[in-house]
Image: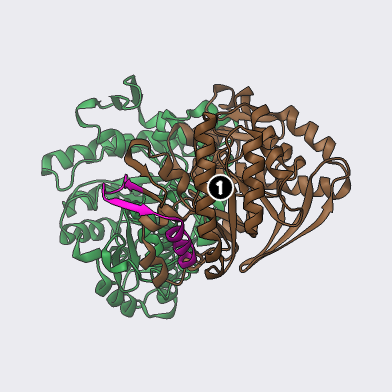
Chain colours: A green, B brown
Amino acid sequence: MIDFVVQKRCGSTAARTGRLQTPHGVIDTPAFMPVGTYGSVKGLRAEDLETLGAQVILSNAYHLWERPGLEVIREVGGLHAFMGWRRPILTDSGGYQVMSLAERRKIDDDGVTFRSPLDGQHRRLTPETVIEVQATLGVDLAMVLDECVASPAERAVAAQAVERSQRWAERSRPLAETLAGGLLGIVQGSVYPDLRGEHARRLVDLDFDGYAIGGLAVGESKEQTWSAVEAAVVELPEDRLRYVMGMGYPSDLVEAVARGVDLFDCVIPTRHARNGVAFTSSGSLIIRHARFETDSRPLDPDCGCPACARYSRAYLRHLKLRGEMLGGVLMTLHNLWQYLDTMRRIRHAIASGALAELRAELARAGAPNGRD
Amino acid sequence: MIDFVVQKRCGSTAARTGRLQTPHGVIDTPAFMPVGTYGSVKGLRAEDLETLGAQVILSNAYHLWERPGLEVIREVGGLHAFMGWRRPILTDSGGYQVMSLAERRKIDDDGVTFRSPLDGQHRRLTPETVIEVQATLGVDLAMVLDECVASPAERAVAAQAVERSQRWAERSRPLAETLAGGLLGIVQGSVYPDLRGEHARRLVDLDFDGYAIGGLAVGESKEQTWSAVEAAVVELPEDRLRYVMGMGYPSDLVEAVARGVDLFDCVIPTRHARNGVAFTSSGSLIIRHARFETDSRPLDPDCGCPACARYSRAYLRHLKLRGEMLGGVLMTLHNLWQYLDTMRRIRHAIASGALAELRAELARAGAPNGRD
């Protein structure tokens, strides 16, 4: 099981620091989880992630269930042993990925049937099977199966997804005892604050180890995002972990933290890195730009990452242009350091009463190149 | 300049250990150079190469001259600064690559003109320009431009290449003083021992800092390889570095060492790694094979590399099958460790009079899966 203790609270916002004890160690919150969908954070060794200070990573139960398959992971002693990663792991159930298969999947009240993009075979996920899969993986934080709808979605569609997700959550809850770690419910409701609030209340009645807010940061406006987060958080218990799934840019993370959120994951730092976009304290750099051709400075002179310790923008540009895999590795190290360091600074700012300043600073740095 | 001192000699073969002092540090020989053609050993950071114990790496003057270009490397302070690699670098002149362009290049007595595969523009290499390029890069060991012919080649073709390579070597030699490091001549002569011997003698008359044997390990038989190596080495001075270019499997390296060779480079360990072939003390493993599906052992239980310290065959197989870049990184760390450790063992065996045993052991392990 898991144990979450709130440690410090911000004087003027809902932000808090906390300490989450899991079977594989402690996570200081607010925390960011690097994403390793297929059992690796692309290009990085487990020891690299330790060096960066990652205390938890996210993987995907559905993808691992497909490949290499549960038998393999069971045989080698669980997901931690398989990956060589000794710290906590959270797995998403894979509901989001299956839902996004669109015409390849069919949802009914019992679960979802889909044709695998890998081999064309029909497979089926139910609330029960996804818990069983995550129990076999041996993860520290497991997620229930939910129905994740487009955001924004029509109100009727969103309401139906809440109903189905709630019934699936009810079936999942009793299975929490089969898990080594904790089980988190997922609040749906798209951009409708009343649906978000209602769903949060009904999930809280089921008494999960923590609560995620799903289906956000996928197309709705910022105002809709924060209304949805606020409507859910206000219904969630103070003493439980809160996790916004799939978010976001550094400026988003601090905004969510200020609204009482403890946990995040996002592919942005790693995917942007491989695409040649570096996050720095003074905005983002598109490394292939000609202005970096002979730039012997590191990506960010204030950064403590292994890439900035040794490699220049000119070299990283060259690696990117030549398609050398080292470029992706170094950029990933850098961007994850930036994210994890942002979380360290957020925790410190909450503890020292300086969150407002950090929030303003991150808002100024903004989304890379004004994009969002 | 460079300074080479032979330290220990094998009692029963031509093998010797040595110490090569270069502007960027010492290389203990016999030595193997990991290949970083475009300025990176694919997937590895400079600090990874240090961890593996690499004392020198090979890069390619022609490729770097094309991209990012000399102006860029000059501007950022030379190739070492550009790459973040502080130890010695040898660059090949690029002659081999240009010669292999076949119908895209035209050789005359003054040099070679070719259409760049990168942008279709015409470019020209001469003996003088390749030295100038390597002087600008600031490398520790530079190579002359030579004419490298297919192996085996017709005798007349081989003889003509020797003549041209010799004339180019004569033009290159006076430019050695423009280099921070040493300049190596290259013995040609294909599979003809008399041509090899004659070319070696003529190059020795020019008094290079060391001598390479080029155009081998590209299609000739093993007997032809060793005849050519022996015919060249017997003419080379005892007190100068000897380097066989582009060789080979571990069993080849020890055979060449026994014939008096000090230095090697080869893409085999790194390219095989990315293709999923691991070298181990008991032969090679093709990691995608189904028999590794649930194999929780490291690639080689006797290996000291960072991959074997933490990751299983089952995980490496999964990474390979999923195309995860971490697979290539870990396999490369492993294979280079194996090669560099083989060189450490060779040096130790020479010093302790146990080379015959090691030679027999490496011959038994042989080329991976009997291929060659």
Is residue A187 left or right of B293 when viewed as pictured?
A: left
Q: Label 1 marks which chain's residue? A: A
- Residue in front for this viewpoint, B351 or B301: B351
Give x and y (percent) for residue B204.
66, 53
- Identify which residue is drawn at 54% across, 54% down: B169
- Residue in front for this viewpoint, A162 or B82: B82
Give x and y (percent) for residue B22.
64, 65
Residue A319 visible somewhere in the drawing: yes
- Identify which residue is drawn at 16% across, 57% down: A224
Magenta part of the chain: B113-137
Give the secondary structure at mark 1: loop
Which three-letter amino acid code belongs to the residue tagged 1? Trp
Residue A21 visible somewhere in the drawing: no
Q: How many marks?
A: 1
Give x and y (percent) for residue A265.
37, 53
Residue A367 falls inside the magenta stretch: no
Q: Is residue B48 above or below residue A176?
A: below
Q: Work out which quarter of the rendered image holds the C terminus of chain A and state it.
A: bottom left
